Amino acid sequence: MQLRDVVPDDVDAYARMRCDPAMTADLGGPLPREGMEGRARAALAGVR
């Protein structure tokens, strides 16, 4: 596995991951799809 910073093309994958019940079961559960693009863009801003 190779870890890297989030890039603009990752917005859709980020949303799918954060909204997936199985993926987020140990992280408090899934987030609503609404507003997810803004969250992904905020994550992008945090890595620059």
Image (cartoon, helix red, strand yellow):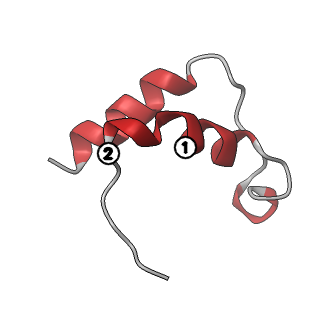
Please state the horizontal and vertical placement of residue 33, each as a whole percent of the image.
Answer: 69, 24
- Cα distance, mark 1 to mark 2? 10 Å
Measured along the vertical axis of the image, is residue 1 above or below residue 44?
below
Q: What label does residue 7 carry, if any?
A: 2
Classify mark 1: helix, strand or loop: helix
- Identify the residue at horizontal 39%, vertical 73% (top origin): 3
Three-letter residue code for mark 1? Tyr
- Identify the residue at horizontal 30%, vertical 59% (top origin): 5
User: Is residue 35 left or right of 17 when viewed as pictured?
Assistant: left
Residue 34 lies in what quarter of the image? top right
Question: Which residue reaches farthest bottom?
Answer: 1
Q: Earlier in the sequence, mark 1 or mark 2?
A: 2
Measured along the vertical axis of the image, is residue 3 above or below residue 11?
below
User: Is residue 11 left or right of 27 when viewed as pictured?
Assistant: left
- Identify the residue at horizontal 44%, vertical 22% (top origin): 38
Tag 1 residue: 14
- Identify the residue at horizontal 72%, vertical 27% (top origin): 32
User: Is residue 22 left or right of 8 when viewed as pictured?
Assistant: right
Q: What label does residue 4 carry, if any?
A: none
Please state the horizontal and vertical placement of residue 31, each as a whole percent of the image.
Answer: 70, 35
Q: Callout 1: 10 Å neighbours few (<14), some, many (20+)?
A: some
Question: Which residue reaches farthest front?
Answer: 9
Discs 1, 2 touching: Cβ within 8 Å: no
Residue 13 lies in what quarter of the image? top right
Please state the horizontal and vertical placement of residue 1, each as a whole percent of the image.
Answer: 50, 83
Three-letter residue code for mark 2? Val
Question: Which residue reaches farthest left?
Answer: 48
Classify mark 2: helix, strand or loop: loop
Q: Callout 2: 10 Å neighbours few (<14), some, many (20+)?
A: some
